[in-house]
Amino acid sequence: EMKNVTLIDRQQDGKQSWRLLDPIGQPIAAFEAFANSLLRSPFNTRKSYSFNLAGFFDFLYEAAANLATEGVSGFDQDTLTNVIEAYDDYLVLGKDADSTIARRVDQTMPSPLVSKQSSAIKHAPVRRFLKLSERVRLQMLELTTAGIKSFDASALPTFPGTGDSKTI
């Protein structure tokens, strides 16, 4: 059961998929784009990734609500990065987290207190979502730069390094 968002079943191209509704019942377009990107994946992957990403969105909304009580409205890049980095601490440690954000969210939406391994499984769709978001941002920026269509796409990546390949 999620606190801030609602995951509902839907059919897309004859396949089971999901739609995520925000706190006022409006579909979240970014989630829908992600769900559509999974349509070629096996059912269990689509289901797991959709449910786990919905849980991440629930965390984001709760973190935003907590930050709003401190007068922070909207996420700048640093705040968003801090919130995303707090997600693992929230999932695994809850009230015992090092992250202030994770502890605050745990007070209003108790952590599931999962294992590190379960947290890693929950992060796989988050990473995939962030990579997809970065590709879309770059495409929008290219179209705007070329003068084909105008989008309000940030010239800076939300998460520098997302989607980059590095030799280890």
Image (spheres, helix red, strand yellow):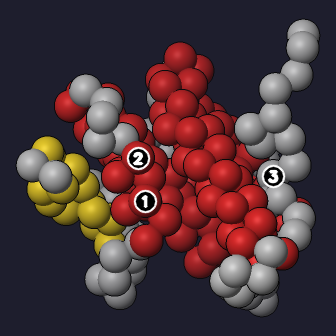
Give the CA distance from mark 2 to mark 3: 20 Å
Q: Dot 2, how many residues are within 10 Å of its Cα: few (below 14), some (14-19), or many (20+)?
A: some
Q: Residues within 10 Å of mark 1 (few under 14, many from 20)?
A: some
Residue 28 at x, y = what percent? Answer: 41, 72
Name the mark on residue 33: 1
For this rendering, which residue is in front, 37 or 69? 37
Q: Which element carries disc 3, helix, strand or loop? A: loop
Q: What residue type is labelled 1?
A: Ala
Say which residue label 3 marks.
159
In the image, is residue 99 above or below residue 64? Answer: above
Camera-side residue of 137 and 127: 137
Residue 16 is situated, as x and y percent measured from the top left of the image, at 14, 46
Q: Is residue 12 left or right of residue 5?
A: left
Residue 96 position, x and y percent, is 68, 39
> Where is mark 2, residue-wise?
37
Say which of 64 and 38 sits in front: 38
